[in-house]
Image (tube, rainbow, N blue to C red):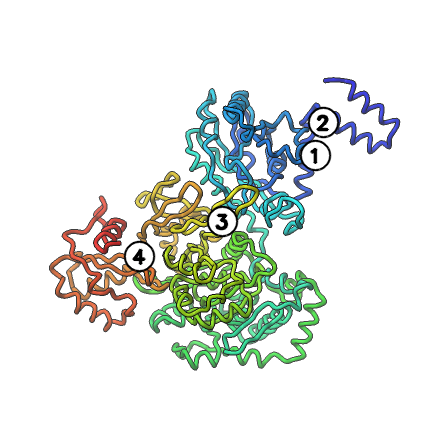
Amino acid sequence: MPVRPLIAAIDLVDLWPTPFALVLLYVVVGWFIPALWDPVYWLIAHTAHRFNVYHADRIPKTGPCLIASNHVTYFDWVLLWAASPRPVTFVLASKFYKNPVLRFLLSFARHRTIRIDAASGRPHAVLEALNVVVRALDEGRVVVIYPEGTLSRNGQMLPFGRGIEHILKRTKSPVPVVPVHLYNLYGTLLSWDKGKILYKWPKSFRRRVAVYFGKPLPPTTPVGDIRLAVQECEADAAIAQSDYLLPPDRQFIRNASRFHKLFKPAVTDVSTGTERTLTWGKLLVGVWGLVGWLKGVLGPETNVGVWLPTGLGSALTNYGLAMRGKVVVNLNYTTGPDALLSAVQQAEIRTVITAKRFVSRIPLNLPPEIRVLYLEDALAAIPGWEKTLKFLCVVVFPGWFLEKVLIRSKSRMDDLLTILFSSGSTGEPKGVMLSNRNIAGNVDGFAKALNIQPGDKLLSTLPFFHTFGFTVGLWAPAAAPIDAVFFPDPRSAKEIGELCKKTGCTVMLGTATFARFYLRRAEKDDFKTVRFFICGAEKLPVKLAQEFQEKFGILPLEGYGCTELSPVVSANLHDVFLSGLKQRANNLGTVGQPIPGVVARTFDPETFAPLPQGSEGLIGAKGPNVMIGYLHHPEKTALSVRDGWYITGDIGVIEADGFIRITGRVSRFAKIAGEMVPLERLDEEMHDVLASGGERVLAVAAVPDEKRGERVIVLHLAEIKDRLAEVFVQLRSRGIPNLWIPDLRDCYIVETFPVLGSGKLDLRAVGLLAKQVAGG
């Protein structure tokens, strides 16, 4: 080590105050001994963030190791330096050194960096740098590489480059690959949030972030599977970090009681025909008053039914029941009496809350032993002085005090929040149990995906008995937080267009069917303030999306999810173009990329073994949004949830850039005009009418339909052709809804039905055959 700089620094001890001299001495010595900077970078990492590291022991204790990480901020390398139990060497692009601050910090880490100058124009510049990486691994070092090659512009991962495969093929001995995800960093100061690296206020100070190390992968792992492994680390990190989220009702209390929001509009409601707006403070007081009323009228029962349309009354009831520690069961008022009674009996509901005005329009036909409570009675029972006193408490006391001492919400993350009923394969509603963790985690991921801003306003029209309406339409405004506009009928296109224009909504939820209504009846400038129009529940035809954009100037974006996943899995977003890079976030014909905290991959339909990236198979999803299970059906839960993955029943492909392309469905449902049609029950009912004696004479499948999303196709043997018209008449007499019953024009003769090796009907092949004969 050269001694002159060191002696000069020591001499300064006599000339300067001791603290300054010690710091200077530390800097000079650290220039020659980079290991001395380990505690400094650890201190920087833990000062800038609340910082968790998971499974750092997955880095081999000795020998070479290649760490593949996502790339979100210019701060990533500091976090990994602090998180790794072994010294690490970073592969960095030359552009990092253009920033003087980063150049100064990196100068102390010069012995642990490999610089790639891809933009230099020199032939073989990248290849030479990769060879340096190979030599570092051959020396037994731990090397960190960012396969994306640049920072994410929207928080989602970019496609991985193949340089990592080149490195792994050229090392002298096999090198394990450890995937790692830097979680929740988008939105911090050195990320591309708001289109700037610097010169912006971060969304939060000392944000809680995480570094999650995955299980080592063999060096022969394709780059697409490495990317999937990094994304699985993100889902695992989201599950672990969800311990630091609050249950949605408690988060609502914290948000609503912030002084700068107390007197700002929170909810605009037109469900009663007249427009009414409540501030955050008044909304919290209303919910708090309802909690007190519920305490006096509800007994020890756990599950409480709600029979109300989308609106302020339903929101107050859901929020109040959650704070009271009850499980909310929003009942489907569009279903038949048998399905309603089945849901009430399965959930062991003894009390249903509704409104007199609503039951006068849609009667609630339940057995007399079911108690009915009316929301009007609750509002009338809360005296004015109590509202005033509660409002003063909201103004004076902080949110945590209101939550823990005054309102006394005792909800915990793993407590059951709701039971949502969806059609079962036999036609009987199937109860899906979702926890506070499921809803809070999904709201958090959805808000991050859309990059929700303080000025955003959500137009909520979907019913709360549907999971998309419950999670995003009801709880996202309360927990994100975001202002909400409630309207009870998503089919009222003209009224919705006028309301959106009047209130300046920026986020809309809907389906392709509703988008068609808006296209026909809404005015050209009704949706001019909308940033995102997310469509789910059914296929969004590309032509429809383009026509919508041509008229209104906003492109509908298709998303994907299911009740068991709380429900959002993925969504297309708007492309981002920043600093010379376009990050594609919208791929028409796909259902988008997984939202933050969720990972999707494909599985073999028979063995359920994970498939390589790009392989067609059953789509599975993992994250904090995976349901607790099916009500009273642990065996069905075990079949659907495997090692933390929910197997959706949809067939698809995960593309190289993470977009999910659905190619078919093996689950026995069709989505017609946004409604779930159980194909298995339809199949069984038709065979029962035909009295086929257990022999298969037909098979039903769903194919895409331009107008209604999907339609039902019947493949049948020639021997029953003349009986089909009478079969459909019999189905109606059995109470089967008209929506379920196919058209005679959609019935096709086949000679045989495709089967699997096990002898079971090959549902995927049936779907392909249906598309073929129907011309789809």
Of callouts 1 and 3, the N-terminal one: 1
Closer to the camera in the image, 443 or 505: 505
Q: Secondary structure at mark 2?
A: helix
- The residue located at (62%, 63%) in the rendering is 253
Instruction: Confirm or deny contact between disc 2 and disc 1 (CB under 8 A).
Output: yes
The residue wearing badge 1 is: 40
The residue wearing badge 2 is: 30
Of callouts 2 and 3, the N-terminal one: 2
Q: Is residue 663 above or below residue 64?
A: below
Comparing labels 4 and 2, the label whose residue is closer to the camera: 4
Q: Secondary structure at mark 3?
A: loop
Q: Secondary structure at mark 4?
A: strand
Q: Locate residue 693 relative to residue 379 in the image: left or right.
A: left
The residue wearing badge 3 is: 575
Cα separation, mark 1 vs mark 4, equals 59 Å
Q: Secondary structure at mark 1?
A: helix
The residue wearing badge 4 is: 704
> Residue 286: x percent and y percent?
60, 73
> Residue 9: x percent and y percent?
81, 24
Cα separation, mark 4 vs mark 2, equals 65 Å
Q: Amino acid at mark 1?
A: Val
Q: Amino acid at mark 3?
A: Asp
Q: Which mark is residue 146?
A: none
